[in-house]
Amino acid sequence: MYTITAASALAENVYEAWISAPHVSRHAEAGQFLVLRIDETGERIPLTISGVDGDLVRIIFMTVGTTTRKLAALKKGDTILDVVGPLGQPTEVKRYGTCVLVGGGVGIACLPIIAKALKTAGNTVIGIIGARNKDLLILEDEMQSVCDELIITTDDGSYGIKGFAAGPLKEICETRPPDAVWVIGPAIMMKVTSGVTKPFGIRTFVSLNPIMVDGTGMCGSCRVVVGGETRFACVDGPEFDAHEVNFDLLMSRQRFYTDEEKESAAHHTGGCGCGGHH
Amino acid sequence: MSDRPADLRVHDFEEVDSGIPAEEAIAEAARCLQCKKPACVDGCPVGIDIPGFIRCIEDGDFRSAIGIIKESNMLPAVCGRVCPQEVQCEGECILGVKDKPIAIGSLERFLADWERENGIEIPELAEKRSERIAVVGSGPAGLTAAAELARNGFSVTIFEAFHEPGGVLTYGIPEFRLPKEVVQAEISEVKRLGVEIRTNYLVGRSLPVEELLSYDAIILATGAGLPAFMGIPGENQIGVYSANEFLTRVNLLHADAFPHHDTPVKKGRSVVVIGGGNVAMDAARVAKRMGADVTLVYRRRREDMPARLVEAHHAEEEGIRFLCCTNPTRILGEGTVTGVEVVSMDMCELDDSGRPSAKPIPGSEYIIPADVVIEAIGQSPNPLLIRMIEGLVREKKGNLLVDESGKTTVPKIYAAGDVATGAATVILAMGAAKTAADAVCRMLTEE
Ligand SMILES: Cc1cc2nc3c(=O)[nH]c(=O)nc-3n(C[C@H](O)[C@H](O)[C@H](O)COP(=O)(O)OP(=O)(O)OC[C@H]3O[C@@H](n4cnc5c(N)ncnc54)[C@H](O)[C@@H]3O)c2cc1C
Ligand SMILES: Cc1cc2nc3c(=O)[nH]c(=O)nc-3n(C[C@H](O)[C@H](O)[C@H](O)COP(=O)(O)OP(=O)(O)OC[C@H]3O[C@@H](n4cnc5c(N)ncnc54)[C@H](O)[C@@H]3O)c2cc1C
Ligand code: SF4
Ligand code: SF4
Ligand code: FES
């Protein structure tokens, strides 16, 4: 049993929780994730470790289905049955020079811990964080404090630069090309945004989020194709060379259980199962 | 053996073979010739005194009978159910030449079940010692090694990556072959010996290698959990599973009870399972129980199938279609599986091992419609931890190199079970674990 020591809402449908899990927190590095199962009937789901403080790990998640909704309902003092981690290969942290970290939506959750590690390794870190609108933007202050420079975009222009994060990224590549770039967010956003750096030949990483079960390399549910080869994202990744990733396959496999997810949502909410609100 | 009727059992996950009553066990025991040089014992990888325990059954002394088994086998309730007896103890039984061999597996299972109902006697523990031993993995190898070492007084911790202990016994072999209650009972027994089991602990990550190496001895029992894929086109589509994933979703996460349990699985209307071993049979029979029409595709002949005889027999009884001498060439569909293209295989020439080698017959391709495809073509050791420990030598298929005592190429580190042999059997994993535990014991007491 792992106790939740703090829980709060960060934005509409985005929540933060701190969980006491010393075996995970003590060895966690930037870019790694954990797998949790809330209760006896729960599904195992992967979430990025987005912060560490002593024995505590932080998760930040968007409510998209049954498990994340159950998770959002948990309060300080509640417990989670299983937490395993840290999983996956850590971010390749070294001295690159200038690094740009791009986060879209809840993908921003992954950035601060990576930014800190890159900063400590002596890099100049530029952050670009984007959301659909001002209310959905998360972790601005935290990113502000760890980045040398922070650019904000919103799709509707309600805050920062209007448009997608790809815009400022392109401009940076043209005017002052960075040495390495990270793009983390929904698959489609990673596909489009990481495409920007390709013509410039800039080393670019994405963190892939396929459906996982064990997170330890024994099922193959998380298989992705990178550079024409099948890899297991949970042990070979989750970060990969963006320009080698087959994003269309990733997006297709993310829809593996679309019907079942609706059925599960309907079962738990008694509603229409449209994946709407609780 | 008393199997529940096939048409009944395909609708549930209850045990197929419901075991034998005491009178039947005694009658079967009476058939044993009590051979002076018992061939059956040579067939048992852990050398159980088979005539010895059978005589006790005949005398009605079940307590002594189970005691004899437990001298060599920690998990009789499991082995009695899943050992490939036809090529081991029963395969060697002298009675098998003319008549039926003694049903040694059934007798073993009878005793273990009897003991579970009548109270398990806890073996005597040696005096507590100060040395700490880490066992990585809680499958049959890990459980056996831990129990053996705990009995010898050592302080033993098992680390298990999954949220439940048991390894393949928990996530792989389905309920209808090996009830989870049986596995749980065996695990409780190991805990009663003082072994601590830490679940959700992925060694190499949750417990870094430096910390692992701080133990006085280490037993790697991490199994062979890495699934192989065929490498044919179409394999990454929706609807294609490794048997490991399919079975884990159902056995460990109860996807058969979705949506009451949150984990989904594609149940499928037409399921194609690829392979001919125990894993393939289990996947096929699980799919069948969830309502699918199941075809099993195997590239060699029916008689070449590596599965336990009784499992293949049960599978056929349950209406699973076997397509032997058939091999998949690609998986069809546009993102979601719609079928499997297979080719017929010619089985003329013999290969090095004397088995006929399978060669595709050009032009014999045809299509089997399917909405779920499950690949059960083999597993190898998970390299995650092994790669992190400097100095461990791996053989060609990724198996850890060990000597006859289970010692690896790194001091203090021993390995047992599938991680050293590649995917094998429960009883071999346990046998190797006992040997490794004995070696660790000697190493630590003779120092
Ligand atoms: C390495 C990794 C890190 C992740 N980090 C975060 C994070 O920090 N914050 C966050 O909000 N989300 C993260 N995700 C995605 C998160 O795991 C899914 O949103 C979650 O599993 C959805 O579960 P659900 O039951 O709420 O929704 P469901 O109704 O089950 O599914 C909704 C969507 O989530 C995806 N999904 C479902 N099950 C899984 C699964 N077992 N593994 C991965 N995706 C799944 C499906 O593609 C589907 O589109 C991460 C995924 C991976 C692989
Ligand atoms: C579906 C199926 C059916 C089978 N049927 C039969 C049968 O009928 N008869 C028979 O004799 N054999 C059968 N087998 C084979 C038999 O189950 C195995 O040979 C046996 O389980 C091997 O035992 P083990 O202890 O070496 O490994 P496993 O049982 O595989 O256990 C290894 C454990 O180690 C854990 N682990 C791995 N890495 C780490 C790590 N880094 N940190 C922490 N934990 C870790 C895993 O999660 C797992 O729980 C079957 C196998 C399968 C998959
Ligand atoms: S352990 Fe297996 S091989 Fe040995 S006697 Fe028992 S059933 Fe037979
Ligand atoms: S070989 Fe058969 S008959 Fe002889 S002792 Fe063994 S079980 Fe009995
Ligand atoms: S999640 Fe099972 S292998 Fe990656």
Image (cartoon, grey):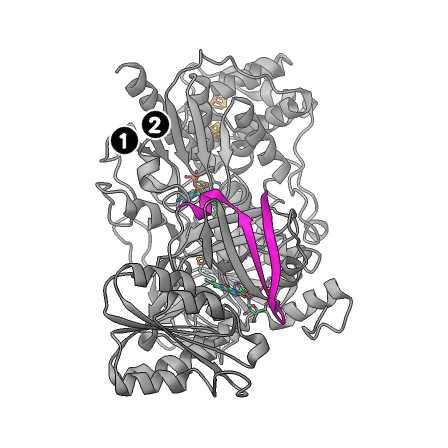
Crowding near pointer 1: few (<14 within 10 Å), some, many (20+)? many
User: Which badge, 2 or 1, is on the more N-terminal residue?
Assistant: 1
Q: As shown in the figure, which amino acid type bears the numbered disc 2?
A: Ala
Q: Position of residue B266 (x, y in %)?
A: 59, 65
Residue closest to the eye, B309 or B141: B141
Q: Is residue B323 above or below residue A153?
A: above
- Whether B237 is among the magenta residues is no
The numbered mark 1 sits on a residue in which chain? Answer: B
Query: Which quadrant would the C terminus of chain A be assigned to in this image?
Result: bottom right
Which residue is tagged 2? B436
Q: Position of residue B250 (x, y in %)?
A: 59, 53
Residues in magenta, as a range: A1-26
Callout 2 touching callout 1 (CB < 8 Å): yes
Q: Position of residue A91 (x, y in %)?
A: 34, 61
Query: Which quadrant would the N terminus of chain A be assigned to in this image?
Result: top right
Judged left or right of residue B119, residue B187 is: left
Which residue is tagged 1? B407
- Which quadrant would residue B318 be assigned to in this image? bottom right
